[in-house]
Image: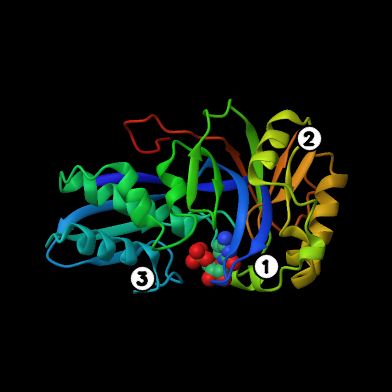
């Protein structure tokens, strides 16, 4: 039996480049794993099964963990089955990549438990079949991602950074946010590489092209951002397609804030081990 840590991610910047003929959007984004995480216990079993600490979470084929188990069986042609228990802590429909992280963690667990020795590069490529964000989690936790998010270029691990994740009650569907994205709301169009160089060289480089779309779908999110900025945080930015924000710098949260607040830090993994506390 293996117990694995399945971390959330934030997007330190996110640029939407163009809409593709397949309906997806080409992006340029720096992803960073953080210490807010689910826990996955995985063991071999007679058939695939998934249980969760959150009774509201669907544990059927719609869950990316079940899709990851089936993908591993299909790709390896193995007759191994797995029993997984998920302790859910990462808020869902928040832009924190929880489902994608769970899928990547399950693939890593299947590989490890069955001693299959599938190279990580292959697991990463397979993961793209489940979701655009899955391949990122096979990096060491800091990466520049392009394409629909599945082209992952490892960056040096970030230096330690404490921050807060703020999750309001509103949920946002990724598909809905992208569907409503308007290029008039995007920043200046640069090539992905230019965006990365600018991000690395500027003093205040955080931005997310999806914020304005999220604010038009859920105006209360704009009010929350304004409130957090007024509370003294240097950077307040929505992550992914929302609805969660991350806050950097020294602010003081208003006592009556209608949101969950998670104190977290950047987290990276060593090249040989999965993410750990
Ligand atoms: O890849 P994933 O299943 O996570 O994407 C969910 C939805 O978000 C897609 O069906 C697509 O509508 C949208 N999306 C997009 N461009 C991306 C990633 C996701 O339009 N780069």
Residue 40 shows up from this direction: no
Which circle marks residue 204 in the picture?
2
Of helix, strand and loop, which one carries label 3?
loop
Tag in front: 2 or 3: 2
Of helix, strand and loop, which one carries label 2?
loop
Q: Quadrant of ligand 1?
A: bottom right
Q: Earlier in the sequence, mark 2 or mark 1?
A: 1
* Residue 53 percent location from the top left of the image: 39, 61
Choose between 211 and 232: the one closer to the eye. Answer: 211
Quadrant of the rendered structure where residue 85 is? Answer: bottom left
Quadrant of the rendered structure where residue 25 is? Answer: bottom right
Query: With 16 as the anchor, is 49 left or right in this view?
Result: left
* Residue 119 percent location from the top left of the image: 27, 42
Q: Which residue lies most toward the right here?
A: 230
The CA distance from mark 2 to mark 1 is 27 Å
Which residue in the protein does label 3 denote?
A: 59
Which circle marks residue 170 in the picture?
1
Of helix, strand and loop, which one carries label 1?
loop
Q: Residue at x 76, y 64 (%)?
A: 183
């Amino acid at each position: 039996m293996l117990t694995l840590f399945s971390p959330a991610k934030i997007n330190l910047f996110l640029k939407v480049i163009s809409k593709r003929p397949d309906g997806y959007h080409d992006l340029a984004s720096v992803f960073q794993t953080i210490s807010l995480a689910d826990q996955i216990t995985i063991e071999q079993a007679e058939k695939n099964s998934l249980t969760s600490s959150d009774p509201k979470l669907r544990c059927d084929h719609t869950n990316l963990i079940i899709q990851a188990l089936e993908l591993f069986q299909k790709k390896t042609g193995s007759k191994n089955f797995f029993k997984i228990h998920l302790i859910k802590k990462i808020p869902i429909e928040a832009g924190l990549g929880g489902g994608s992280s769970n899928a990547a963690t399950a693939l890593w667990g299947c590989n490890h438990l069955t001693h299959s020795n599938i190279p990580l590069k292959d697991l990463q490529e397979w993961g793209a079949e489940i979701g655009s964000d899955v391949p990122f989690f096979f990096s060491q936790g800091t990466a520049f991602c392009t394409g629909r998010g599945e082209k992952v270029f490892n960056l040096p691990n970030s230096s330690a950074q404490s921050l807060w994740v703020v999750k309001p009650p509103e949920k946002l569907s990724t598909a809905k946010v992208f569907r409503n994205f308007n290029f008039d709301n995007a920043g200046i169009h640069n090539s992905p590489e230019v965006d990365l160089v600018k991000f690395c060289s500027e003093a205040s480089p955080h931005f997310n092209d999806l914020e304005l779309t999220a604010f038009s779908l859920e105006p209360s999110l704009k009010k929350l951002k304004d409130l957090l900025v007024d509370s003294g945080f240097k950077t307040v930015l929505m992550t992914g397609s929302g609805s969660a924000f991350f806050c950097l710098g020294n602010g003081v949260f208003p006592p009556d804030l209608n949101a969950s607040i998670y104190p977290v830090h950047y987290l990276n993994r060593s090249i040989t081990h999965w993410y750990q506390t």
